[in-house]
Amino acid sequence: MKAETAKALDSTATADDSQINQVIFDVQQWLASEYDWPFLRSRWDVVAAPGSRYLAYPTVDGVNLATAINFERAGDLQVYVKWNNVWQEVPYGIREMEEFNYIDSDRGIPLDPIQRWMFDDESNFEIWPIPAGTQTIRFVGQRVLTELRTVPVTTPPVWNDAALLDLDDLMVKYFAAAEYLTRKDQAGIAKLLLNKAQNRMQMIRMTYPKLQQTCIVGGATMFDRRALRVVPMVVVGGK
């Protein structure tokens, strides 16, 4: 970053370090919130005990990495519940007329499986209906970035020089340098770096594997893969 902005590379030349670090931090946060990055995608499991209604968000993902869900990309977030050993999608939103008039959580009425979820506050979420049995809820989405500041975060922040970027370093460097030089009224050089940044991002995003789903008409198979249909369980009560 210093080299791209024609700064002295001497370890004693630290006058602009805080500003440069802040620009790098802001640029990486912006890129992570604007685009899908497959290597940031994670799974988080939460066990919903019988009778529970409000649960804490998970803070450790499926590979035991201490990280949180990036709710700034909530549109990309998927939530599932595992009930009777089958994963089922859990849509968002719990409403008084549509849900509570049917199964009222305020009266503590339980029913399996969990069918809805909703934000409660910054630390908890609500599920509906209240489960009668133990179930596993899974969040699938993009994780937050590795913290580049020391924790707890102070004002002004103290930067952790040992922290590594999650996104491509060249891409972040070019975007950050373009942003920095634009603020310094060096629009010509900034434009050149912005072009490099955009080309770099396009190149690395094109190399990522893509999820491809084949629609099979008529029940035939393709590439030795079977199309499976999940049939929901229907329980009929009777005398």
Image (cartoon, helix red, strand yellow):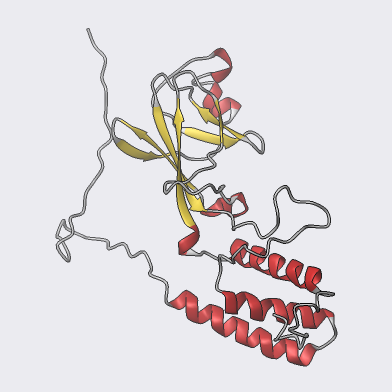
Front residue of 122 and 12: 12
For residue 209, above or below residue 94 = below
Q: Residue at x 38, y 70 (%)?
A: 209
* Quadrant (top left, top right, bottom left, bottom right) of the C terminus: top left
Q: In this view, does 175 lie to the left or right of 238?
A: right
Report the residue at 48% width, 74% height from top. 205
* Along the line of sight, the residue nearer the viewer: 25 or 77: 25
- Residue lying at the far top in this picture: please name it: 239
Residue 65 vs 173, above or below: the answer is: above
User: Which residue is found at the position 70% from the left and 54% from the top?
Assistant: 150
Above or below residue 140? Residue 48 is above
Looking at the image, which residue is at 25% across and 19% down? 236
Give the total of numbered labels: 0
Q: Please state the horizontal and vertical placement of residue 204, each as a whole percent of the image.
A: 48, 77
Quarter of the view holding residue 100: top right
Q: Quarter holding the N terminus?
A: bottom right
Name the one closer to the observer, 109 or 3: 3
Left or right: where 232 falls relative to 118: left
- Give how far across and how far down residue 50 sits, in percent: 44, 19
The x, y position of residue 136, in whole percent, is 40, 33
